[in-house]
Amino acid sequence: MDFSFNEEQQLLADTVRRFVRENYSFETRRAILASPEGWSREIWRQLAELGITALAIPGRHGGVGTDAATSAVEVMLVMNALGEGLVLEPCLATAVIVPGLLAHLGDEKASAELLPTIAAGERIIVLAHQEPGTRGELDRVATRAKAADGHYVLDGHKSVIMHGDIADEWLVSARSDGEDDTRSDGEDDTRSGGEGNTRSGAADRSESGISVFRVDRGTPGVKVTGYRTLDGQRAADIELNQVKIPAHRRVGEEGRAFAAIEAAHALGVSALCAEAVGIMKAVIAATVDYTRNRKQFGVPIASFQVLQHRMADMFLHSEQALSMSYLAAIRCTDADVGERRRALSAAKVVIGQAGRYIGQEAIQLHGGMGMTDELIIGHYFKRLTAIDLSFGDTDFHIQRFIQASAEAGSRTSAA
């Protein structure tokens, strides 16, 4: 299989890397991180001018995207480059996941209203789907949407929503149909990778009955609690208490949004994998540079054979992660849901393990300084850790890979 990129794709990757190198130095990032907003609207505007925010958006809605498969590869190249700079702006949440969601929901009216504003960098729109205790299980939605007199009333709690506190509008998932699979308060849940997880209240496991609603910032009944995650990114918990939404603000068909949500998350997992690979590449480069300059006994520590072996192992892990990110980009738009799940889970596991290994080795080779905010290595490691935990951790994806493989085997046997 040919994994080489065409001239336009290579130019795109080089352009984004040059932008990061010239406009997103470590000092610039630290200044943005220390600001009250935690991100830069100016950088976001410049990314829009480069076409980054329009990459996954079709031309009829102001974007530069072509077919879904090609866009996924181009998003991979961009996220790889942005990962090297640890960019804090909401590229993944707004410019990757939301366009993918709207494309699969098939609501042309909503797409025509929202996508051009994303492509132009004018508005921040994010998907609010994750809930407390779900840990990657997309079909667990307890937020309710009750229809009444030409509107819906939303009640529920969304948690750790990427850039949720800076969004101009949220696309909120809620169960508009289906009965809850009631669970007693405090019941221990061990379905996510075998680890205990206490979750209060009810959760519905059905894929049917889930809808998506547009909720503007400042809507009565919405409470937003913003905070920084361990890697410095912005996130928010969003509480919905008797939030009244006009019926025309539902996006797509009622009760049939799950497939679109899963497809959008598949694009998100692929983009995260690409970002992680970019970070690993930067970590190895920084570590090699450090060992060439750090001296012991009058010689660079890079000359010590045991450290050379450790850096060689880091490189091997990064190459394996790179291959799996290619797999994720190729399969994230696969129409076969089972194969898509299996490929993405395999990539997420391998890349999560590689990121942990490379990050830990880099910290050790840098010594105590590696854990300080003064060196970028610690920031890289925090982001790699956050990526491993996002959209389901390694344990979750190991279990999903096993399940998807078993289901594929059953289908083969039946055939």
Image (tube, rainbow, N blue to C red):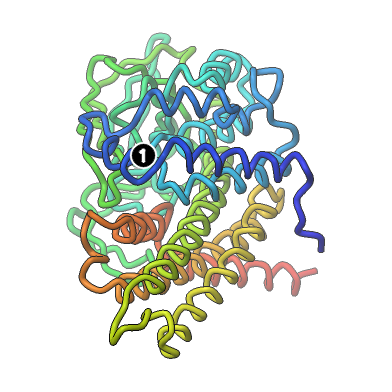
Camera-side residue of 387 and 241: 387
Q: Quadrant of the N terminus?
A: bottom right
Q: Quadrant of the C terminus?
A: bottom right
Q: Position of residue 79 (x, y in %)?
A: 54, 46
Side of 88 where 110 appears, left or right = right
Quarter of the image for residue 260 reads top right
Camera-side residue of 89 and 62: 89
The residue that label 1 is drawn on is: 162
As drawn, 400 above or below 383: below
Quarter of the image for residue 393 reads bottom left
Question: How many marks are shown on the rendered structure?
Answer: 1
Q: The disc labelled 1 sits on which kind of residue?
A: Met
Side of 238 where 73 appears, left or right = right
Camera-side residue of 279 and 273: 279
Residue at image x 40%, y 55%?
Answer: 387
- Mark 1 falls on what kind of element? strand
Q: Position of residue 71 (x, y in %)?
A: 68, 39
Side of 115 where 309 appears, left or right = left
Outermost residue, front direction? 298
Residue at image x 46%, y 57%?
Answer: 279
As drawn, 230 above or below 75: below
User: Visible in this render: residue 395?
Assistant: no
User: Visible in this render: residue 224?
Assistant: yes
Residue at image x 61%, y 72%?
Answer: 406
